[in-house]
Image: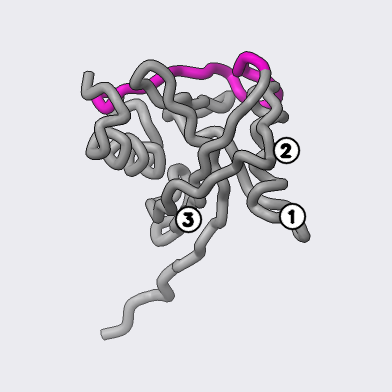
Amino acid sequence: MEFGPRTNTVIDKVAWIRVEDGRLLAARTRGRELYYLPGGKPEPGETDEQALVREVREELGVALDPATVTPLLITRAPADGKPAGTVVRTACYTADHTGVPAPHGEIAEIAHLTHGDHPRASPAARQVLDHLAATGLLLRW
């Protein structure tokens, strides 16, 4: 018996992890229900740090300090809204910033999530919520 070809597409992304008062900053794009980690895909020739700075500026209107960009973790999760087998590999970073995060560009809304907000979060964001809760950095509810 033969099965059809399996899709094993990997989408590489970068994300900014910002925890304030025990809550994770997340963003929801227009036309989507789930909240995602602020960030996006690097453009050809961009480093992760350059992509992170650019994406966060475009999405939230804040300036990240490139000198403070620090790796936190890498997630691998099913891609929301993509064909089965598509995985998002997200390199997550912390960084200092200037400005107040607010929706810009494609972002419809921002939220500050606790671990109890799992159902509202994308699969990658859920992994970050779990990681932050396990380390005591995130409010449980």
Nearest the viewer among 80 and 77 is 77
Q: Are marks 1 and 3 in contact (CB under 8 Å)?
A: no
* Sequence-wise first label, 3 or 2: 2
Q: N-terminal of the two: label 1 or label 2?
A: 1
Q: Which mark is residue 89?
A: 3
Q: Residue sitting at 39 percent across and 52 percent down?
A: 78
Mark 3 packing: few (<14 Cα in 10 Å), some, or many (20+)? some
- Give the label on residue 86, or none: none
Viewer-side residue, 47 vs 127: 47
Quarter of the rendering occupied by the N terminus: bottom left
Which structural element holds mark 2? Answer: helix
> Residue placed at 34% from the left, 21% from the top?
22
Q: Nearer the viewer, residue 63 or 14?
A: 63
Residue at far right of view: 45
- In the shown orientation, is residue 24 left or right of residue 62? left
Report if residue 33 is visible in the image.
Answer: no
- Element under disc 3: strand
Q: Quadrant of the C terminus?
A: top left
Q: Position of residue 66 (x, y in %)?
A: 68, 40
The percent position of residue 99, horizontal first and vertical second, equals 67, 17
Write down the region rendered in magenta: 99-116
Applied colour scheme:
one colour
Looking at the rendered structure, the kind of residue marked 1 is Glu
Q: Position of residue 105 (x, y in %)?
A: 70, 24
52 is higher (above) or lower (below) than 42:
above
Circle 1 Cα neighbour tier, 10 Å, few/some/many (<14 / 14–19 / ≥20): few
| In front: label 1 or label 3 | 1
> Residue 29's image quarter?
top right
Q: 10 or 5, which lies in front? A: 10
Give the label on residue 54, or none.
2
| 11 up-or-down from 54: above or below | below
Q: Which residue is mark 1?
A: 46
